[in-house]
Image (cartoon, rainbow, N blue to C red):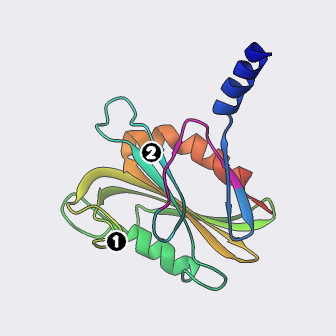
Amino acid sequence: MNRLLGVLVVAVAVVAHAEGAGGLTWTAPADWAVQGPRPMRAATYKISAAKGDTEGAELAVFYFGPGQGGAVDANVKRWVGQFQTADGKPITKEAKTKAEKLNGLPLTTVDVKGTYTGGGPMMGPSTPKPGFRLLGAIVEGAQGAVFFKLTGPEKTVAASEKSFRKLLESVKKQ
């Protein structure tokens, strides 16, 4: 019996993390570490650094309530505005955005890389971080939008891209 219980505990330890906000649920990869509660966030995940990167990435999930959080286009523009080229110019044409339906829900994604400047003292790094990338997604649910923002060094984010897409594919109505 104790041996069986040990097997069950191990099995539970490798199960992906199921989360939810705003009437939507999703399943995060099992190797992404769930972080403790933070202001304004529905969830936060820490992603280990890829080989060659000195730091890992973070997926921050935000939900502000019905009709809150701003328009999709404004959020995409704000996220892209948190990056600049190596010579300090705004990144505009290099950013990739896509609108689609996934599991019957409107989904807008953004992919941008360059020097990450963040979104102010509470939303980003204190010093610019070159060689960073952001994969963002906004899923529009009946109770409002849920915002997924994955930021980190380019190699780490690239290594997490398939897992991020799998997380998005897991988003469903509760």
> At 38% from the left edge and 42% from the top edge, which residue is drawn?
56
Is mark 1 in CB contact (under 8 Å) with mark 2?
A: no
Give the SS element for disc 2.
helix
Q: Nearer the viewer, residue 2 or 141?
A: 2
Disc 1 or 2, which lies upstream in sequence?
A: 1
User: Relative to 19, does residue 145 appear above or below in the rendering?
Assistant: below
Left/right of residue 58 with respect to residue 66 in the rendered view: left
Give the SS element for disc 1.
loop
For the residues carrying marks 1 and 2, which lies nearer the camera in this image?
A: 1
Q: Nearer the viewer, residue 89 or 47?
A: 47
Q: Nearer the viewer, residue 153 or 21?
A: 21
Residue wearing tag 2: 157
Amino acid type assigned to the residue bearing label 2 in the image: Val
Q: Please identify the quadrant where the C terminus is shown.
A: bottom right
> At 49% from the left edge and 50% from the top edge, which residue is drawn?
35
Q: CA distance from mark 1 to mark 2?
A: 19 Å
Tell me residue 156's x, y (percent).
41, 40
Left/right of residue 64 with respect to residue 18 in the rendered view: left
Residue wearing tag 1: 119
> At 69% from the left edge and 27% from the top edge, which residue is drawn?
9
Tell me residue 23's x, y (percent).
75, 69
Number of marks in picture:
2
Residue 14 in sight: no
Tell me residue 166's x, y (percent).
66, 45
Amino acid type assigned to the residue bearing label 1 in the image: Gly
Tell me residue 157's x, y (percent).
45, 45
User: Relative to 117, does residue 134 appear above or below in the rendering?
Assistant: above
Around disc 2, counting alpha carbons within 10 Å, would you say few (fewer than 14), some (14 to 19), or many (20 or more)? many
Q: Which residues are magenta?
A: 26-37
> At 73% from the left edge and 64% from the top edge, which residue is drawn?
24
27 in magenta: yes
Q: Nearer the viewer, residue 149 or 7?
A: 7
